[in-house]
Image (spheres, grey):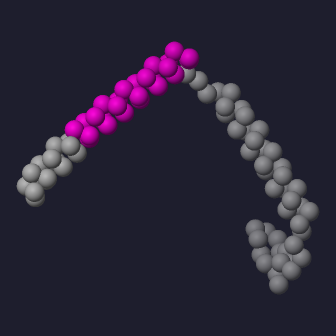
Amino acid sequence: LLHFSGSSWYDMRKPERAVFQKETIMSLANYLSETREELKQVRWPTRRQTFVFMALVIVISVVVAAYLGAFDFLFSSGLKAVLF
């Protein structure tokens, strides 16, 4: 079986595993290297910002839980009053 790729033909019956493995390892190493370089450019939040955002998430979660719990209680109480 011959296959045309780009400007050359190659035999599909003979996979070149060593070349494939080397290219895969090199591409993985290249990916990890580029990822490390990108992470150096990230502007990480300060400790204070992290705590402020964490507190904000907790407060909003508690408020939403209370809001939904109140409506659940009202609707279930109203439904019990109507059915029983």
64 sits left or right of 44 in the view = left
Which stretch did the figure color magenta? 46-70
Question: Which residue is painted at 41% across and 28% down in the image?
Answer: 58
- Is 49 magenta? The answer is yes
Instruction: Choose between 81 and 47: the one closer to the eye.
Output: 81
Q: Quadrant of the C terminus?
A: bottom left
Percent x, y of residue 68? 26, 41
Q: Residue furthest bottom?
A: 1
Instruction: Choose between 35 and 1: the one closer to the eye.
Output: 35
81 sits left or right of 70 in the view = left
Query: Majority secondary structure of the magenta segment?
Result: helix
Q: Residue furthest right?
A: 18
Q: Residue furthest top?
A: 48
Residue 79 vertical position relative to residue 18 in the rendered view, above or below: above
Q: How many marks?
A: 0
Percent x, y of residue 18? 92, 63
Residue 1 vertical position relative to residue 51 in the rendered view, above or below: below
Percent x, y of residue 20? 85, 62
| Quarter of image, res 9 | bottom right
Q: Quadrant of the N terminus?
A: bottom right
Question: Which residue is painted at 73% across and 38% down in the image?
Answer: 34
Q: Residue furthest front?
A: 84
Question: Which residue is painted at 81% across and 56% down in the image?
Answer: 24
Question: Which residue is painted at 20% across and 43% down in the image?
Answer: 73
65 sits left or right of 3 in the view = left
